[in-house]
Image (cartoon, grey):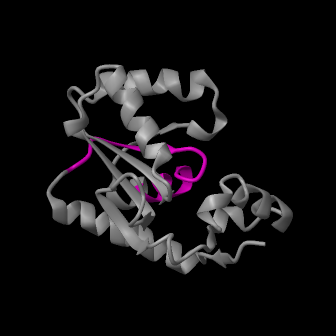
Amino acid sequence: MPTLTPVDQPEFLTAVHYVAARIRESGWQPDVIIGIGRGGLIPAVYLSHATSIPMLSVDHSSHLPDFSAGLLVTLAAMSATQRLLFVDDINDSGTTITHVKAALRGAGGTLDNVRFATLIDNVVSAERVDYRFRTIDRTANKDWFVFPWEQVSPVDKVIEDAAVVPERLA
């Protein structure tokens, strides 16, 4: 069984404010924040409120084209003239970020206008993020982080979600 490590609400709020401050300090002002579903939706809403930047969403986790692939084509077109900040809860293996970048690039998107933010960033991930609250090293830390919105799930479901990619916890 994985080690379940809760991220409590005060830590989550601290993370959002920290990321918002890093964005402000960077001088790069996104025109829109995009929450990546499922885990990035709530952080994106909070970050949108903390920065007064409008928010959109794309539901990568559903694997339904109308809610992911189709929207990424629209966002690729937007990236020609607007700065887009994609938000997720954790950059673990990097597969979500790789997917988003490939979809945007494949639809003619301008990656120079795209950045990524996460609450937790795995330093050995295949991808890098531009903004993060905290870093982990998956070669040493195998915990499954349970964010406040996941804490309403039955424990069995959380464990099932953790087991989807067993090598990240092994």
Who is closer to the viewer here, 125 or 84? 125
Residue drawn at 33 percent across, 57 percent down: 51
Q: Which residues are magenta?
A: 29-47
Quick one: which residue is furthest to the left in this view? 27
Q: How many marks?
A: 0
Residue 28, position as x, y percentages in the image: 18, 52
Quarter of the image for residue 156 reads bottom right
Quarter of the image for residue 158 reads bottom right
Residue 79, position as x, y percentages in the image: 27, 30
Residue 75 against residue 144 in the figure, above or below: above
Residue 46, position as x, y percentages in the image: 47, 59
Quadrant for the N terminus, please: bottom right
Residue drawn at 41 percent across, 72 percent down: 135
Residue drawn at 81 percent across, 58 percent down: 157
Quadrant for the C terminus, please: bottom right
Q: Is 85 part of what is drawn in magenta?
A: no
Is residue 134 left or right of 29 when viewed as pictured?
Answer: right
Is residue 80 left or right of 71 when viewed as pictured?
Answer: left
Who is closer to the viewer here, 43 or 115? 115
Residue drawn at 65 percent across, 77 percent down: 6
